[in-house]
Image (spheres, grey):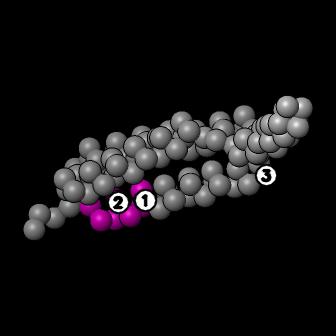
Amino acid sequence: MLKKFAAAALMLSLAVPAFAQSPNTPGLDKREANMEKRIEQGKASGALNEKEAARLEKREAKLKMAEERAKADGEVTPQERKRLNKKADRLSRDIKREKHDKQTAPKE
């Protein structure tokens, strides 16, 4: 009985740091997925032309790279989280602006 308890305690003590080492940014991940869908929808509807879509997708990729750099040391600090959210705010705003401007993709 004591051996089973000790084994369970050891497994738990090893698992807890693994969770702490893996910083999660679920809110940002959800926002990125939503922005990606919005860009794809804009391309499909013609609200975004090729240049606009390419520019927005490039910025989205840069946001993902910045997120990976923030996670690289094992912890996303409050300052890093704030900076990432600010970049996401700007990108989201620009997606809306580009989708609602007068430029459209040529109709085929």
Q: What residue does disc 1 label?
A: 57
How many other residues sit within 10 Å of disc 1, few (<14), some (14-19) or many (≥20)? some
Q: Position of residue 27 (x, y in %)?
A: 54, 36
Q: Residue at x 11, y 63 (%)?
A: 107
Classified by dominant secondary structure, the portion drawn in magenta counts as: helix
Q: Say which label, 3 or 1, has the lower sequence index.
A: 1
Disc 2 element: helix
Label 2 is placed on what type of residue? Ala
Q: Is residue 42 above or below residue 19?
A: below
Would you say the residues marked 1 and 2 are in contact, meaning their CB atoms lie under 8 Å apart? yes
As measured in the structure, the alpha-carbon distance from the residue carrying label 3 to the one carrying label 1 is: 26 Å
Q: Say which label, 2 or 3, has the lower sequence index.
A: 2
Which image quadrant is residue 57 in? bottom left
Q: What residue does disc 2 label?
A: 53
As measured in the structure, the alpha-carbon distance from the residue carrying label 2 to the one carrying label 3 is: 32 Å
Disc 3 element: loop
Say whether residue 50 is magenta: yes
Q: Which residues are magenta?
A: 49-57
88 relative to 56 in the view: left or right: right
The mark lying in front, picked from 2 and 3, is 3
Label 3 is placed on what type of residue? Asp
Q: Residue at x 43, y 42 (%)?
A: 92
Q: Position of residue 65 (x, y in %)?
A: 61, 58
Disc 1 element: helix
Would you say the residues marked 2 and 3 are in contact, meaning their CB atoms lie under 8 Å apart? no
Q: What residue does disc 3 label?
A: 73
Q: Position of residue 90 (x, y in %)?
A: 49, 42
The mark lying in front, picked from 3 and 1, is 3
Q: Residue furthest left?
A: 108
